[in-house]
Amino acid sequence: MQVTVEKLSPVLLEVAVQIPADRVKSEVEKAYVALQRTARVKGFRPGKAPRHVLAHLFGGRIHADVAQRLVDTTLNQALADQKVQPLSEPSIAPTELKPDDAFRYKARFEVRPDIEEVKWEGFEVKRPSTAPSDDMVDAEITRLRREHSALQAPDPERPAQKGDTVTITFSLEVDGREREPKDQEIETELGSGQVFKEIEDALIGMSPSEKKDVLMTFPERHQNAELRGKEATFHIALKDVKERVFPEIDDEFAKDCGQESIEKLRESLRESIEKDLKQKATNVVAEQLVIELCKANPIPVPPSLVEQQAQMTERELLQTARRQGQQMQPNAEFRAHVRADAEMKVRAGLLMAEIAKAKEVKVTDADIEKAFEELAEQTGKNVAKVKAEYRDPKKREMLVGMVLEDKILDLVEAAAKVTEETKA
């Protein structure tokens, strides 16, 4: 078997394989012998059809099957002999198989680019401040007060105002006809943007039992295609008004939140915010290091890996949007952004793999144990359950890759100039 390798681009190879005529002839003969035992040909008993008849009836299929079998049984060996590691499925271009001639085929596939040296030291990045401000703590206090608030009817009764939660019934009239269902009932907080602004504005100042007609035009990008750009009338009736009553900021409130006093609550919130800020700062530094690494090493990347990464990223973004109740319509701009991000991730992955090889960075059992503990803390699961989830070889391989990436980024960060930002 003769094998030659041609580099068509930094990430595309073509392997040409030639299989000698004697092997081709032997494989064709085996195929005819096997066919002769099973072929049913009109005018001949099973297994008795002459070779020339079989060749006339099935020759094309036999040659195609033998050609495919020769490719299947020789390509991996040819790649191993040439120490070639494909990153994509090969594209095969066979020649016509002739029983008495050598058989030739070519296989094209993507490979890792040759990387002579990776520049990864001396990057300049900024780490955001991890010191919680008083405003951040106050914002968390406000959030907790809302969680522990209650809705009640104003006493004395008054018209609706911003911040109130109101219950309304409404019917929608479009093109002179009311649409089904009629008299729908919803609850909304005024000022939250849960309903159209025109309806919110009309509700402010209304009293229970009062009715109004609200004229408006549906947005051109409304989720219901039938209503886009349509003029409509909402017939609304206000059923009731409730105001939100917030707890006082005192020790009793702190106890409801699981702390002994308001001072302890603020201290606990500050610690929680600081932990969150540190994680965000770590992520920001990592993102900057990846950008700098890719800028310093503009290596070519295999298109198929970029496509796979882009598809995975788009799928994850759409799933996240659906979980949050959002509708996301991928357009050309969205896909261009996703593809650019995917290209950077693939380039960074190739570069970090090269750094790991050069610096002999490996993932140890202790690294994996630490990763299990961190995942358990993040997800609220026990370590044993997390370990069970990662028994799947593919999931474990992904985890090992993530841990290795973190170790490489730690190495790059240690060699970088990191400036700590301070709050103004």
Image (cartoon, rainbow, N blue to C red):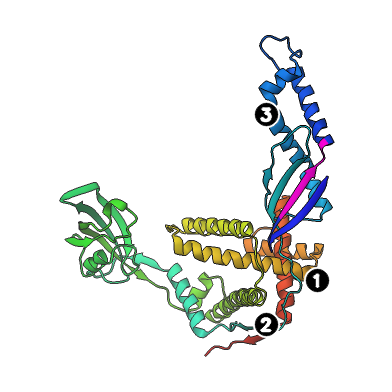
Q: Write down the residue under mark 1.
A: 358
Q: Quadrant of residue 12?
A: bottom right
Q: Write down the residue under mark 3.
A: 61
Residue type for callout 3: Arg
Q: Tell whether 20 sits left or right of 396.
A: right
User: Mark 1 packing: few (<14 Cα in 10 Å), some, or many (20+)?
Assistant: few
Q: Secondary structure at mark 3?
A: helix
> Could you tell me if residue 127 is visible in this image?
yes
Residue at x 42%, y 73% (from the top left corner): 247
**Residue bounds of the magenta highlight:** 14-21
Residue type for callout 2: Phe
Gap in Å between the C-alphas at discs 1 and 3? 50 Å
User: Mark 3 packing: few (<14 Cα in 10 Å), some, or many (20+)?
Assistant: few
Gap in Å between the C-alphas at discs 3 and 2? 61 Å
Which one is in front, 17 or 407? 17
Where does the N terminus fall, quadrant-wise? top right
Residue type for callout 1: Ala
Q: Tell whether 52 sits left or right of 189.
A: right
Where does the image place residue 272, in percent across and percent down from the top left? 59, 75
Q: Secondary structure at mark 2?
A: loop
From the image, state whether disc 3 or disc 2 is nearer to you.
3
Q: Quadrant of residue 240?
A: bottom left
First-in-chain label (1 vs 3): 3
Q: Write down the residue under mark 2.
A: 123
Q: Which mark is residue 333?
A: none
Q: Vertical placement of 381 versus 417: above or below?
A: above
Q: Vertical placement of 270 versus 353: above or below?
A: below
Q: Secondary structure at mark 1?
A: helix
Q: Quadrant of residue 218?
A: bottom left
